Amino acid sequence: MFSPNVTFLESTVSPQGEVTIDIYLYEGGAMGSNHYVFEKNGPLWFTKQIYNLASQKQEIEYVWKNNDIMIIEGEEVSVN
């Protein structure tokens, strides 16, 4: 069975320090496309996937709009 290569890229924290998002790259290789996955860290060991972007780009752009919204590749994404 095929399993993608997963690379942790970085963590980013909201402007007020209340939310932490981990960003991973799932490399599909010859079998598929790359996916950038944004996961919100929750209480204890829980995580919530807030965004999944299929892209062949080497880097993607994101910025915090406020404590509840990130702009990822020009799209507003709620982190709650």
Image (tube, rainbow, N blue to C red):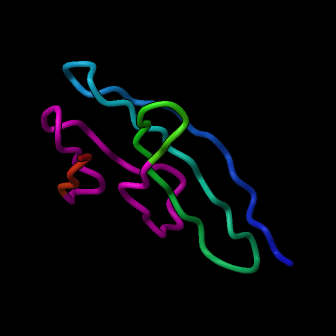
What is the number of callouts on the image?
0
Task: From the viewer's perspective, tell me whether residue 58 is left or right of residue 74.
Answer: right
Residue 29 horizontal/vertical position (percent) = 74, 70
Residue 74 is drawn in which quadrant? bottom left
Foreground pick, 61 / 6 = 6
Query: In the drawing, does residue 50 fall left or right of residue 71?
Result: right
Q: Is residue 6 above or below residue 62?
A: below
Residue span colored magenta: 48-75
Q: Tell me the quadrant of the picture where the N terminus can be found.
A: bottom right
Looking at the picture, tell me which residue is in the foreground, 5 or 16.
16
Identified at 48% across, 49% down, the residue is: 59
Name which residue lies at 26% across and 46% down: 79
Residue at (26% x, 24% y) in the render:
18
Q: Is residue 24 above or below residue 20?
A: below
Question: Where is residue 50 shown, x and y percent of the image?
Answer: 36, 55
Q: Residue furthest top?
A: 17
Q: Where's residue 6, x and y in %?
A: 69, 52
Examine the structure image and report whether residue 58 is included in the region drawn in magenta: yes
- Placement of 69 over or under 44, stated as above or below: below
Q: Seen in the image, is 12 located left or right of residue 32?
A: left
Q: Residue furthest front?
A: 44
Residue sitting at the far right: 1
Q: Residue at x 31, y 30 (%)?
A: 19
Q: Quadrant of residue 53?
A: bottom left
> Would you say 72 lies left or right of 34 here?
left
Name which quarter of the figure residue 20 lies in.
top left
- Up/down of 16 relative to 29, above or below: above
Residue at the outermost left position = 66
Does the segment drawn in magenta span residue 55? yes
